[in-house]
Amino acid sequence: MKYQAVIGLEVHAELSTKSKIYCSCSTSFGAPINTHTCPVCTGMPGALPVLNKQVVHYAAKMGKATGCTVNQLCKADRKNYFYPDLPKAYQISQFDVPICENGEVFFYVDGEKKSCRLERIHFEEDAGKLLHDEIDGTVVDFNRCGVPLIEIVTKPIEGAGDRAPEIAGAYVRAIRDIVRALNISHARMEQGNMRADVNVSLRPSPDAPYGTRSETKNVNSFRGIEKTIQYEIRRQAARLDDGKEILQETRHWDEATQTTAGGRLKSDADDYRYFPDPDLVMLHITKEHIEEMKAQMPEMPRERRNRLKSEWGLSDLQMRDILN
Ligand code: ADP
Ligand code: ZN
Ligand code: MG
């Protein structure tokens, strides 16, 4: 190939806590619309958020399982934007001081060991859901508002060549397996409780600066992630061949046409006017708590794999046939 692809993956996983991140509303799926709501998660003036401890525990466990540093101090920031499914007009997320940073996730592609490095893991609240209906028009369901998510962000994945789609798919499967082993998320992509934003850019050579990326939002199947990368590499290469520039934009994957379509031009972080949420204090996680968590970690998929390999004397290729 004439161009080198650089990939970035942002995986959102819904945490399986009983209640929401900043209020005590239920997170259970499939309730009648707008029944799991209260003044906090519908953004009523004066309502105050109270952080769910379990969210912190789950996010930190994920950090421990992926070799991240769990920061003893972190904070919650407001990410401001307007959309009808976001009643406060801001999402409580984490900006410059996330709970976890600098990890690495290992996995196998065709029996060959690979890894992706992580930039960060942070926790945030989900938005509501717009339901489009021919009779009622558009209805907004706030049940999902405030359901806790973790967002797992990779560092740019370089040098994957033709195997970029495969490697991305295997990485996201590894994330699914880890969150399930930790019992912190059901990670069912078809129910939308795990979804990925797929960033792709091209550059002429491995030592050239990164090109402009497109970001395909909310891809909710492994095939979709792989196909998005394939399609974006082809689309961007064709544009570059024609001497056209790549726009920094968000796109979406269309399963029916098996293509991505342009969305909106991407805002920079500046446009979100991130600032620390004045309703929430800095979060302090004690060393003891982190140690205690480490001691409680279950056997991770990779450890189990290594154990079975040595106990049974199997090769990587044989392991692939057993586990995949
Ligand atoms: P944003 O909030 O704008 O989506 P993030 O930094 O949270 O930005 O995530 C961007 C993702 O894309 C990360 O996984 C990052 O490693 C990756 N990335 C950054 N620059 C590029 C690029 N030029 N090409 C491909 N991926 C990139
Ligand atoms: Zn609520
Ligand atoms: Mg993003």
Image: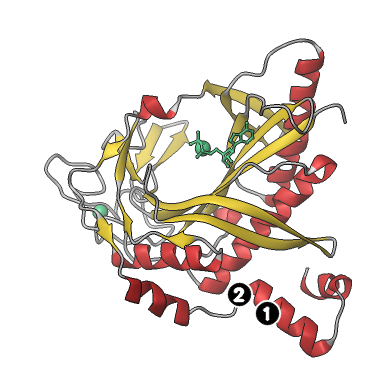
**Numbered tag placed on residue 194 in the rendering:** none
Q: For the residues marked 1 and 2, what is the alpha-carbon distance in whole angstroms?
A: 6 Å
Residue drawn where x is 55% and y is 60% of the image: 187
Asked whether the residues under the numbered discs 1 and 2 touch, taking CB atoms below 8 Å apart as contact, a structural biologist would say: yes
Residue drawn where x is 80% and y is 11% of the image: 242
Secondary structure of the residue carrying numbered label 2? loop
Q: Say which quadrant the N terminus sits in.
A: top right
Up-down: is 190 above or below 91? below
In the picture as drawn, the residue positioned furthest to the left comes out as: 46
In the picture as drawn, the residue positioned furthest to the bottom comes out as: 311
Nearest the viewer among 292 and 11 is: 292
Q: Is residue 321 left or right of residue 282?
A: right
Q: Is residue 296 in view from this perspective?
A: no
Which residue is labeled 2 in the image? 300
Q: For residue 107, which quarter of the picture? A: bottom right
Mark 1 and ligand 1: say if the CB distance to the nearest ligand atom is below 8 Å: no
Q: Return the x and y of residue 290 as percentages of the image width and height.
A: 39, 72
Q: Is residue 236 left or right of residue 13?
A: right
Which residue is labeled 1 in the image? 304
Secondary structure of the residue carrying numbered label 1? helix
Q: Return the x and y of residue 223 as percentages of the image width and height.
A: 73, 48
Amino acid type indicated by mark 2: Met
Q: Return the x and y of residue 291 as percentages of the image width and height.
A: 40, 77
Q: Say which quadrant the C terminus sits in.
A: bottom right
Q: How crowded is the residue under tag 2: few (<14 C-alpha within 10 Å), some, or many (20+)?
A: some
Q: For residue 303, which quarter of the picture? A: bottom right
Q: Return the x and y of residue 197 as percentages of the image width and height.
A: 57, 41
Q: How crowded is the residue under tag 1: few (<14 C-alpha within 10 Å), some, or many (20+)?
A: few
Amino acid type indicated by mark 1: Arg
Residue drawn where x is 17% and y is 47% of the image: 279
Residue drawn where x is 57% and y is 24% of the image: 249
Q: Is residue 121 in view from this perspective?
A: yes
